Amino acid sequence: MDEKKDYCYELWGNDTFSNETYQCGVYRHYSSARRAMKRHIAETLETQSDGLRDTFWITKTIVEEHNAVLKAKRKRIDAAHKHIQQDKEFVETILPDLECFMKQCTKSVGAYEFPLPDASKETCIRNIKVIFEKAYKCRVRYSYKIAITFEDHQGFLGTVTVSYAYGRLEDVVTEISENNHIESLREFIGRRIQKHYCDNL
């Protein structure tokens, strides 16, 4: 005779607009999951438009399998937090040099790659570039940007860009050369590192 298995009931939803699936809850009994689903459906009827309302369903899952999934997810989350902390610590070591590099790149327009140390290979950061250029279709305006390329666990690269200054040439040079940008760099890069790892969970 097969060993009697212990089950639980998972309530799932799908965001119709973004086509993303999310878990609403886990219940010991089907009746509890059913009542919760009815509440979620009632809420969407009041708050979401017809044709864009989220959909819901219940799945019956073996408790041991559910716990194994939770354990694996917790392991991924812990690993992501460890990587985030390590990468942020690495960023702290390059911030002063990066700010000096930014100021040096105001001498003439162009794209300049910041020389990352070898330690960057242990992080998700693959490239940092300063882009100082004339604004698109504008002869008298200039933009000053920082572009950072990240690599995910599958080896795919993605670049995000933040603008630090825009305006007349002398105004842009003054803004970058005379102001402190370490705190804004720390906030921007740290936020992108956290998003990078959390999106890959």
Image (cartoon, rainbow, N blue to C red):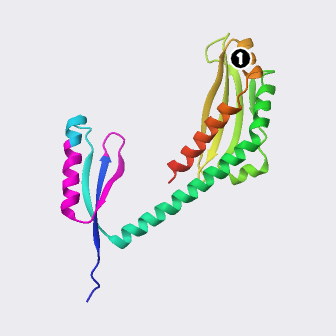
Residue at disc 1, secondary structure:
helix
Pointer 1 local density, CA inside 10 Å: few below 14, some 14–19, many at least 20: some
Which amino acid does the dot numbered 1 rest on? Val
In the picture, the quarter occupied by the N terminus is bottom left
Magenta residues span 15-42
Residue 44 forms part of the magenta stretch: no
Of 103 and 156, the residue lying toward us: 103
Q: Of all residues shown, which one is farthest toward the bottom? A: 1
Q: Position of residue 69 (x, y in %)?
A: 42, 65
Q: Position of residue 152 (x, y in %)?
A: 59, 51
Residue 3 against residue 172 in the figure, above or below: below
Residue 33 forms part of the magenta stretch: yes
Residue 25 against residue 147 in the figure, above or below: below
Residue drawn where x is 30% and y is 42% of the image: 16
Of 6 and 52, the residue lying toward us: 6
Residue drawn where x is 28% and y is 67% of the image: 8
Q: Position of residue 104 (x, y in %)?
A: 81, 27
Query: Looking at the image, can residue 189 be seen?
Result: yes
Q: Is residue 183 left or right of residue 72?
A: right
Q: Quadrant of residue 169?
A: top right
Residue drawn where x is 61% and y is 30% of the image: 162
Which residue, given by chain and number where applicable, does mark 1 sit on?
A: 172
Q: Quadrant of residue 58?
A: bottom left
Residue drawn where x is 60% and y is 44% of the image: 193
